[in-house]
Image: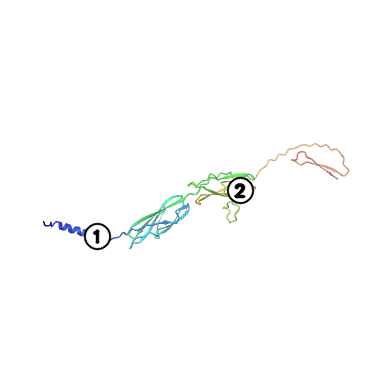
Amino acid sequence: MKPSRRCLPVALVMMMLSTSLVGCSGLSSTTPNARVSADLQEINAGETVNFDARESSSPDPTYIDEFRWEFGDGESRTTKQGIVSHTFNSAGNYEVEVTVVNDNGEVDRSSVSIFVNSPPTIELEMPTFVRAGEPARLDASSSSDPEGATVEFMWDFDHGVDSDGDGDKTNDAESSSSYVDLVYEASGNRTGSVSVIDDKGAMSTQTWSLMVISRTFMVVWEEQHLELEWSGYLEQGQSYELSHEPGRGHGLFRSMQP
């Protein structure tokens, strides 16, 4: 039986299609490969992180045209170089993403996680004034760390005195207790501060003012009449003197003057 002529064109088309597909299989992708790193992944609020995406690549003959940065806090930036710095002012967890774009418009993405530590919360209880010579308790023991870490304390009792001699009157470490009892002998306004530090070094500082007023005393004078009987005689030119000192009861002091 002879093959049908109708099958020959179909077979020829299939062979051509197969040859065409084999020729295309050698084409390579030009999609870029994004890679990003950070010099710090745990920081305190207000600190800066440096990001580096220079390990990203794009196959020849393409090249990386730009880096699009999303910092996770609502801020974004586009750079031609693969490095950028960003400051995180609020505590939390952030996913920082870079989108690498090559000259063909093809993209790839990579991300890195950043944890921003919260500073401690200060709770300070103290009087608004105290009398000179009397103790005033300043209590910061209710202060805490939002992440639950143990906190440390640093007190500067007087911003008018540089007790450690470093030229800064506001950073003297005069006590590490959670509370202090202060006694000022002279009246006037005193200003100091308490700092609370967590396990990652995040610090909160609160300045306080205390009015020291003069002590007052109530003095009551009582009039007393003393009667004294004296017998004797004086020579001509002599005198006899009696004196009494308040507060010493009825004691009398006698003296004879020639």
Question: Which is more toward the observer, 20 or 47?
Answer: 20
Q: Which is closer to the viewer, label 2 or label 1?
A: 1
Amino acid tagged 1: Val
The x and y percentages for residue 36 are: 40, 56
For residue 138, which quarter of the picture?
A: top right
The x and y percentages for residue 7 are: 15, 56
Q: Residues within 10 Å of mark 1 (few under 14, many from 20)?
A: few
The residue labelled by disc 1 is 22
Identity of the residue drawn at 47% across and 54% down? 47
For residue 24, which quarter of the picture?
A: bottom left
Which residue sits furthest left?
A: 1
Q: Please state if 186 lies on the left or on the right of 247 as rendered.
A: left
Label 1: element kind: helix
The x and y percentages for residue 71 are: 41, 53
The x and y percentages for residue 183 are: 62, 46
The residue labelled by disc 2 is 189
Q: Residues within 10 Å of mark 2 (few under 14, many from 20)?
A: few
Which residue sits furthest front?
A: 1
User: Does the image show residue 162?
Assistant: no
Amino acid tagged 2: Asn
Which residue sits furthest bottom?
A: 61
> Marks 2/1: CA distance?
90 Å
